[in-house]
Image: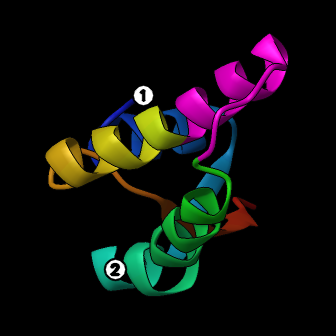
Amino acid sequence: MKDISRHQATIEECGYEVVGQFALPESSWWENFYSPLAQRLEMYEMPWDDEEARAVLSMVQGEIDIYRRYSSCYGYVFFLLRRRS
């Protein structure tokens, strides 16, 4: 992961300029992704005989937990670029 200024430097090194940019707000992640995902996980909280299924559910729960703890440290930024002339 890089901070925004490092991404902008890479963009410029590749011959583009940033026309615009925006970051997805934390609320978008909670309301549209992690909260519904957590609700679905609750449906599956039962004893599983399938180790692979347990591992997947654990991994998904781990991702939710990481975002809950560290969402202020990372996110998604989208850049609108134009090739420099």
Q: Residue 30's quadrant in the figure?
A: bottom left
Q: Which is more toward the observer, 51 or 64? A: 51
The disc label shown at residue 68, or none: none
Give the side of residue 69 with respect to residue 2, left or right.
Answer: left
Three-letter code, disc 2: Pro
For mark 1, does the 10 Å Cα neighbourhood hold few (<14), some (14 to 19), or many (20 or more) residues?
Answer: few
Residue 66 covered by magenta stretch: no
Q: Which residue is mark 2?
A: 25
Residue 6 lies left or right of residue 85; in this view the side is left
Segment tinted magenta in the rendering: 46-60
Above or below 56: residue 79: below
Three-letter amino acid code at the position of disc 1 = Met
**Could you tell me residue 72's position as x and y percent?**
15, 55
Residue at position x 37%, y 31% from top? 2
Q: Which residue is mark 1?
A: 1
* Vertical relation: 2 (above or below) 84: above
Q: Position of residue 12 (x, y in %)?
A: 54, 43
